[in-house]
Image (tube, rainbow, N blue to C red):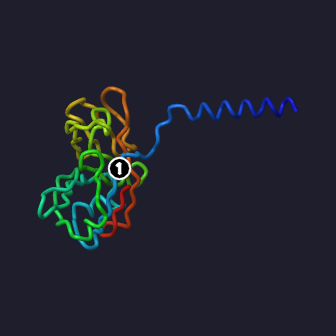
């Protein structure tokens, strides 16, 4: 019986240690996007949603007032806009901290990802007024911050690969049904 109690204590300590300062894989910052590329036919987004072209990422943002547009810019230099339909408004999109997401397949594990387009180490999602700390994408799948000079590898789960230690990119749950299918981020 004494050995059994000892085993329970050891297991409890191990479980508590595992729950320490673990980073959650997905953010709880409000984010919601439903985009039907079968309707919009946006080639910039299609290139990022293609599992056969990993390493291509597209920045997503909403521009304009009336009419509004979805704007997609890839790390390969392609930029395309799609008009914002009434159906798109029905889904009430929220694009992360400051109206920007980056989506695409990583080339290390071919997993589809969505990141916030703001630097996680220079942004505060809780701040009432926050300066724009948008990341710049490079053709090799990195996102860099011009303010803190960190570089994040989008192909490797958004981890920092140059600069001071800090948080990895803010990540949202994302899935796609293919290049000219549906994109969902939440």
Quarter of the image where the N terminus is located? top right
Residue 73: image x %, image y %?
Answer: 20, 54
- Which residue of the protein is positioned furthest toward the bottom in this rendering? 39
Residue 93, picture quadrant: bottom left
Please tell me which residue is depicted at 38% across the width and 50% down the height of the picture: 172
User: Residue 163's image quarter?
Assistant: top left
Instruction: Name the residue furthest top.
Output: 164
The picture places residue 154, in percent across and down from the top left corner, at 33, 45
Image point (31%, 64%), residue name: 91
Q: Nearer the viewer, residue 93 or 133?
A: 93
Which residue is labeled 1 in the image? 30
Taking 15 as reference, is 161 left or right?
left
Where is residue 142? Give x, y as percent: 28, 42
Residue 106 vs 123, above or below: the answer is below
Farthest right residue in view? 1
Residue nearer the viewer, 136 or 95: 95
Say left or right for 39 vs 28.
left
Q: Residues within 10 Å of mark 1 (few under 14, many from 20)?
A: few
């Amino acid at each position: 019986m004494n050995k059994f109690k000892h085993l329970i204590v050891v297991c409890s300590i191990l479980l508590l240690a595992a729950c320490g300062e673990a980073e959650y894989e997905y953010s709880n910052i409000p984010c919601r996007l439903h985009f039907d590329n079968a309707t919009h036919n946006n080639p910039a987004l299609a290139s990022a949603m293609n599992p056969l072209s990993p390493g291509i990422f597209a920045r997503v943002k909403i521009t304009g007032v009336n009419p509004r547009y979805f704007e997609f810019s890839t790390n390969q230099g392609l930029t395309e806009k799609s008009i914002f339909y009434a159906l798109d408004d029905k889904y009430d999109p929220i694009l992360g901290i400051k109206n920007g997401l980056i989506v695409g397949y990583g080339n290390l594990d071919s997993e589809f990802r969505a990141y916030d387009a703001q630097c996680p180490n220079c942004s505060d999602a809780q701040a009432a007024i926050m300066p724009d700390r948008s990341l710049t994408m490079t053709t090799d799948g990195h996102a860099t911050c011009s303010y803190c000079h960190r570089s994040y590898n989008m192909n490797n789960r958004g981890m920092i690969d140059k600069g001071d230690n800090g948080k990895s990119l803010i990540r949202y749950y994302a899935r796609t049904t293919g290049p000219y299918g549906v994109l969902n981020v939440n």
